Image (tube, rainbow, N blue to C red):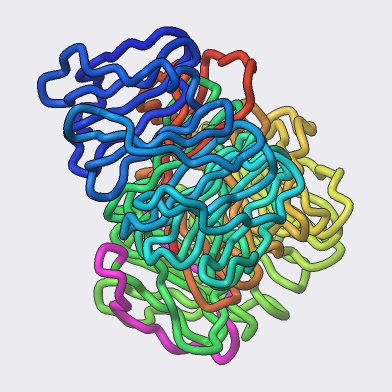
C-alpha cells in the first residue's frame, strides 16, 4: 500500500461488476457482465478458477467469514452458494427475490447472509441450511447496498430512494432512516467499532453517520462523479471510496479533538509559526497554549477579565497576542509563559488582532468601529483608522505588509494603506455583517465571510468583486487560505467547516462534527491540517491532502454495493484525502 502501485492485473470479459477478497486475503473473487465469476489465488496470480455459466452477469459476491464458501448473486434474483476452498462445487441456492440481487453481506459469525434487491426488499438468509429467515421492507425503490454491523445485530442498507436505513436484525424492523444524499445511495459500510456507517452517493459525496445519534457527522466530497462503493480497513483508520470518475480515494478517519474546560466556548485558535503549538481564545477569560502532537495544554495565560475573542502569534513565535471583551490587548512571552505587556485604547470589545509579516506592528479591530495599529517593541499606539460605521470584526495584513483589510458589521470590507494610515477602498456586496477576512498567500485575492452565509472573493489589487461561494446554511464566520493558496476554509453557525477549491469556485468538502457554531478556522503552517474552534468547547483538527490521486480504476465496483449503469467515466478526477476528527 505504501508504494501505491499496481501489483497484478486480472482480466474478465466485459465490465467488472463486483470484487471480494477471502478473509485471509489469499483468494480474490470477481464477477463481470459477460462471463462467469472467477476466483484467483493472490499469491501465484495465475489463471484462476471459473465458476459455472450460471454465475455470468452476477452483480454481487461475498465470502463467508471462514473463507470456505462463497455467495454469488445473479441477475435472475437467485443467490448461489459455492465451495470456495475446494472443488468450487455448488452448495445450494437461495431464491425469493423477484428481481436482481444488487448486494450481499455475511454476519461476522457466518450464520446469516443479507441481500439487497431490485424488488425493494432486504432479505435475511440462513446460508448453512440454505433457507430464508426474513424479508425486510421499507425502501421505496431499488436497494443497492447492504452491510452487517460488526456485532451482527444491525444491518445498514442504501438505495435509489436516497436513504440509508438501519435495521434491527432480531426485531426485523427499521430503527432509523437517514437522509441527506441527493441521489442514489450506492453502497454502505460499517466502521469496525460499529459506531459509524459510511454511505456512497450518486451525488458524488461520501457521508459518515453516527449510528447511535442517527445523524450525519461528515460529508466527504472528492469524487467528480457517482461514488459507487465504500470500504473501511480492519483497524478503522482508513476509508476507501471508488467512483465513476475512474478514481479510488483513500480517507484517513483518525483525528483529534482538543477539549477545554466544561461549559467553555472557544472563539478562536492560531498556530505557532512552526506548527507545534496551538493557542486558543476562550470564554473563561483564559488563553491556552496546546502541544499539538501531545494533544495537551502546555500553559494557561490568565489576565483578561472577560471572554477572549482572538489570538495571534508573532512571526518568530516568541510573542502571542490576545484580545477580548475587556477592551485590552495582551502580549504574552511564549517561552517564559508570562504576560509581557497590556495595550489599552479601544473603547469596547476587541474582536481581532493580527501581526504584520515582519512582526513589528500589530493591528486590532473592535466594537468601537476602529482599526488600530500598534508598535510591538515600543508597546504604544501608532494609528487609529476610522471609517467603519459599526463594529469592526476582523483585521488582517496583506502578505507584503503594505495593506490592511478589515471586516465590519456595516456590511463592508475596507482596505487600508498601512504606511499612509489612510483608506484605500470600501468593498460592498455582503447582505449582512462581514465576519472575517483573509488574504491569499500571493496577496492577489481577498476572501471575506459574512452573516449572509456567503464567502466572497475579491481582487485585492483592483478592489473589485470576483465570486460568491454559497454553501453555509447560516452565518459564515471564520475564513483562511491554505499556505499554497489553492484551498480556502470557512466555518459557520451551521456547525460545519467547508473547504473550497479557489480556482474552481466550488466546495470540495463539508466537515461536520462540532455540536455548535464554529467561529474560527486556521490552517497549520504545513497546510496539511485545519483547526476549527467552536462554542461547543472543542478545537477539532482535520488533516487534508488535496489532490492526492492514489489510483485509476476503470469500471470497478466494490463488493457490497451496486450503482447506476451506463454513466461514462470522466478523466481528471481530483480526489481529496483527509483525516476527519471523530
Task: Indicate the quadrant containing the C terminus: top left, top right, bottom left or bottom right.
Answer: bottom left
Rendered view: 250 above or below 392: above
Camera-side residue of 85 and 180: 85
Rendered view: 315 above or below 313: above
Left or right of 180? Residue 298 is left
Q: Position of residue 470 (x, y in %)?
A: 76, 43
Camera-side residue of 40 and 389: 40
Asked whether the viewer can see residue 482, the reply is yes
Rendered view: 56 above or below 482: above
Camera-side residue of 24 and 402: 24
Which residue range is magenta in the image? 292-315
Q: Position of residue 573 (x, y in %)?
A: 51, 22
Q: Is residue 162 magenta?
A: no
The residue at the point 63 percent across, 26 percent down is: 564
Q: Position of residue 101 (x, y in %)?
A: 56, 35
Q: Position of residue 498 (x, y in %)?
A: 61, 49
The residue at the point 59 percent across, 89 percent down is: 306
Q: In this view, which residue lies farthest toward the top? A: 13
Q: Quadrant of residue 408?
A: bottom right
Task: Indicate the quadrant containing the N terminus: top left, top right, bottom left or bottom right.
Answer: top left
Left or right of 198? Residue 564 is right
Left or right of 369? Residue 582 is left
Camera-side residue of 34 and 561: 34
Q: Quadrant of residue 81?
A: top left
Amino acid at each position: 500500500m505504501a508504494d501505491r502501485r499496481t501489483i497484478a492485473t486480472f482480466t474478465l470479459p466485459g465490465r467488472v461488476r463486483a470484487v471480494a477478497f477471502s478473509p485471509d486475503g489469499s483468494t480474490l473473487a470477481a464477477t463481470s457482465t459477460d462471463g462467469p465469476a472467477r476466483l484467483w489465488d493472490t499469491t501465484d496470480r495465475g489463471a484462476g478458477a471459473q465458476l459455472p455459466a450460471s454465475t455470468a452477469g452476477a452483480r454481487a459476491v461475498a465470502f463467508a467469514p471462514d473463507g470456505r464458501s462463497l455467495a454469488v448473486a445473479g441477475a435472475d434474483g437467485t443467490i448461489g452458494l459455492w465451495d470456495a476452498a475446494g472443488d468450487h462445487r455448488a452448495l445450494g441456492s437461495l431464491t425469493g427475490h423477484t428481481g436482481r440481487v444488487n448486494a450481499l453481506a455475511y454476519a461476522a459469525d457466518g450464520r446469516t447472509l443479507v441481500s439487497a434487491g431490485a424488488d425493494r426488499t432486504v432479505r435475511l438468509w440462513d446460508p448453512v441450511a440454505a433457507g430464508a429467515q426474513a424479508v425486510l421492507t421499507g425502501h421505496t425503490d431499488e436497494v443497492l447496498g447492504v452491510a452487517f454491523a460488526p456485532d451482527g445485530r444491525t444491518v445498514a442498507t442504501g438505495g435509489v430512494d436516497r436513504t440509508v436505513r438501519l435495521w434491527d436484525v432480531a426485531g426485523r424492523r427499521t430503527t432509523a432512516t437517514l437522509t441527506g444524499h441527493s441521489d442514489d445511495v450506492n453502497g454502505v459500510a460499517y466502521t469496525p467499532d460499529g459506531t459509524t456507517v459510511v454511505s456512497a452517493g450518486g451525488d458524488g459525496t461520501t457521508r459518515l453517520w453516527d449510528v447511535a445519534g442517527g445523524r450525519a457527522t461528515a460529508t466527504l466530497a472528492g469524487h467528480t462523479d457517482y461514488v459507487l462503493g465504500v470500504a473501511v480497513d480492519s483497524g478503522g483508520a482508513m476509508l476507501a471510496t471508488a467512483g465513476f470518475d475512474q478514481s479510488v480515494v483513500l480517507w484517513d478517519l483518525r483525528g483529534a479533538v482538543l477539549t477545554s474546560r466544561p461549559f467553555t466556548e472557544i472563539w478562536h485558535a492560531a498556530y505557532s509559526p512552526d506548527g507545534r503549538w496551538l493557542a486558543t481564545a476562550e470564554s473563561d477569560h483564559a488563553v491556552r497554549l496546546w502541544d499539538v502532537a501531545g494533544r495537551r495544554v502546555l500553559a494557561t495565560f490568565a489576565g483578561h477579565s472577560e471572554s477572549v475573542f482572538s489570538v495571534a502569534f508573532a512571526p518568530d513565535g516568541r510573542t502571542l497576542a490576545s484580545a477580548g471583551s475587556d477592551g485590552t490587548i495582551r502580549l504574552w512571552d511564549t517561552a517564559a509563559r508570562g504576560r509581557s505587556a497590556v495595550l489599552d485604547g479601544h473603547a469596547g470589545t476587541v474582536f481581532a488582532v493580527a501581526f504584520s509579516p515582519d512582526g513589528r506592528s500589530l493591528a486590532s479591530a473592535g466594537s468601537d468601529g476602529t482599526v488600530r495599529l500598534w508598535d510591538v517593541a515600543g508597546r504604544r499606539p501608532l494609528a487609529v483608522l476610522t471609517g467603519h460605521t459599526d463594529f469592526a470584526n476582523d483585521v488582517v495584513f496583506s502578505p507584503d505588509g503594505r495593506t490592511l483589510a478589515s471586516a465590519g458589521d456595516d456590511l463592508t470590507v475596507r482596505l487600508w494603506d498601512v504606511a499612509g494610515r489612510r483608506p484605500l477602498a470600501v468593498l460592498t456586496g455582503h447582505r449582512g455583517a462581514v465576519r472575517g477576512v483573509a488574504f491569499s498567500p500571493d496577496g492577489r485575492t481577498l476572501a471575506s465571510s459574512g452573516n449572509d452565509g456567503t464567502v466572497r472573493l475579491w481582487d485585492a489589487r483592483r478592489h473589485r468583486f470576483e465570486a460568491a461561494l454559497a454553501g453555509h446554511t447560516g452565518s459564515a464566520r471564520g475564513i483562511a487560505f491554505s499556505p499554497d493558496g489553492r484551498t480556502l476554509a470557512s466555518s459557520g453557525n451551521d456547525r460545519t467547516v467547508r473547504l473550497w477549491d479557489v480556482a474552481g469556485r466550488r466546495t470540495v468538502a463539508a466537515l461536520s462534527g462540532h455540536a455548535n457554531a464554529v467561529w474560527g478556522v486556521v490552517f497549520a503552517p504545513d497546510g496539511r491540517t485545519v483547526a476549527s474552534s467552536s462554542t461547543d468547547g472543542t478545537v477539532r483538527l482535520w488533516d487534508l491532502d488535496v489532490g492526492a490521486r492514489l489510483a485509476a480504476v476503470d469500471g470497478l465496483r466494490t463488493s457490497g454495493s451496486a450503482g447506476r449503469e451506463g454513466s461514462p467515466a470522466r478523466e481528471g478526477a481530483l480526489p481529496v484525502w483527509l483525516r476527519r476528527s471523530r
